[in-house]
Image (cartoon, coloured by chain):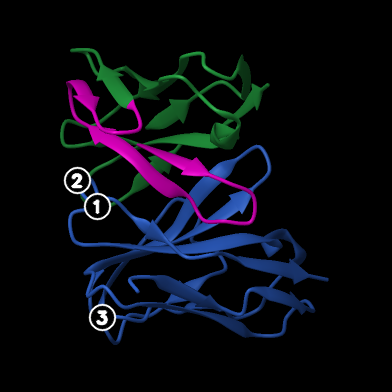
Chain colours: A blue, B green
Amino acid sequence: EAQVTQNPRYLITVTGKKLTVTCSQNMNHEYMSWYRQDPGLGLRQIYYSMNVEVTDKGDVPEGYKVSRKEKRNFPLILESPSPNQTSLYFCASSLSDIGTYEQYFGPGTRLTVT
Amino acid sequence: LAKTTQPISMDSYEGQEVNITCSHNNIATNDYITWYQQFPSQGPRFIIQGYKTKVTNEVASLFIPADRKSSTLSLPRVSLSDTAVYYCLQGGYNKLIFGAGTRLAVHP
């Protein structure tokens, strides 16, 4: 089954404790992206990757890191999480040029930073 | 600065046609306009995409005027299962700009 998976689905952590949210897709998609979703703000893009070893900042990259060492994986790293990073996070992938190809979203990761 | 704006919420009744309009501020020449649907506890799901004029698929129609400063998602004969949040999106090769979402409630 074609899908985007994220782990963990739920995470509660404390300020400053490094964490990684994994994202994996099995559709051989070139483009992958991370979003955060907050009430009243919709989805905001954090980082995206056009292909392996190619990443770039979205609208809200501060406090986040990403890497794309393999085509299928695109982990999101929070080196020193803070309470304002409490949010619902979605990973997405698409075949190529994201303007013309639909994105497939993962199920989401709900992160709480205390 | 590119920005998309859409109504916060809408109400409708089963069997009616629903039109949700999004304004696209500073849309780039190579940007496409896409609409997604999201149910609670799920990721967004693709509905329809277009560049200009009208596009229709099995679930919706998308109207984009020549100036591309707005787009209208049309859902024909909605049912209770269409209750969801609908997002408009503009984007091209890299950054994607989502609207804040329109919460559609369909009543019996």
Percent x, y for residue B42? Answer: 57, 56
Residue at left offset 51%, top offset 13%: B16
What separation in Å lies between label 1 and label 2 (alpha carbons)? 5 Å
User: Dot 3 corresponds to which residue?
Assistant: A71
**A19 to A101, vertically: above or below:** below
Please give the chain letter of the residue carrying mark 2: A
For the residues labelled 1 and 2, say whether their Cβ atoms are less than 8 Å apart.
Answer: yes
Quadrant assignment, res B12: top right
Query: Is B22 colored magenta in this rendering?
Result: no
| Amino acid type of the residue tagged 2 in the rendering | Thr
Quadrant in which residue A114 is drawn = bottom right
Q: Distance between the Cα atoms at labels 3 and 2?
A: 20 Å
The amino acid pointed to by label 1 is Ile
Mark 3 vs 2, N-terminal side: 3
Graded by Cα atoms within 10 Å as few (under 14), some (14 to 19) or many (20 or more), the crowding at tag 3 reads many
Residue tagged 2: A100
Separation (CA) of disc 1 from disc 3: 16 Å
Q: Give the percent coordinates (x, y) of residue A61.
A: 48, 61
Q: Disc 1 on helix, strand or loop?
A: loop
Dot 1 surroundings within 10 Å: few (below 14), some, or many (20 or more)? Answer: many
Which quadrant of the rendered structure holds the N terminus of chain A? bottom left
| Helix, strand or loop at mark 3 | loop
Count neighbours of disc 2 (C-alpha within 10 A) and say few if under 14, some if 14 to 19, many if 20 or more. many
User: What residue is drawn where x is 54% and y is 33%?
Assistant: B82
Look at 63% across and 59% down and name the residue there.
A88
Residue to which mark 1 is pinned:
A98
- Residue B101, visible in the rendered structure: no
Q: Mark 1 lies on which chain?
A: A
Question: What's drawn in magenta, residue-wise?
Answer: B35-60
Task: Say whether residue B59 is magenta.
Answer: yes
- Chain of the residue under label 3: A
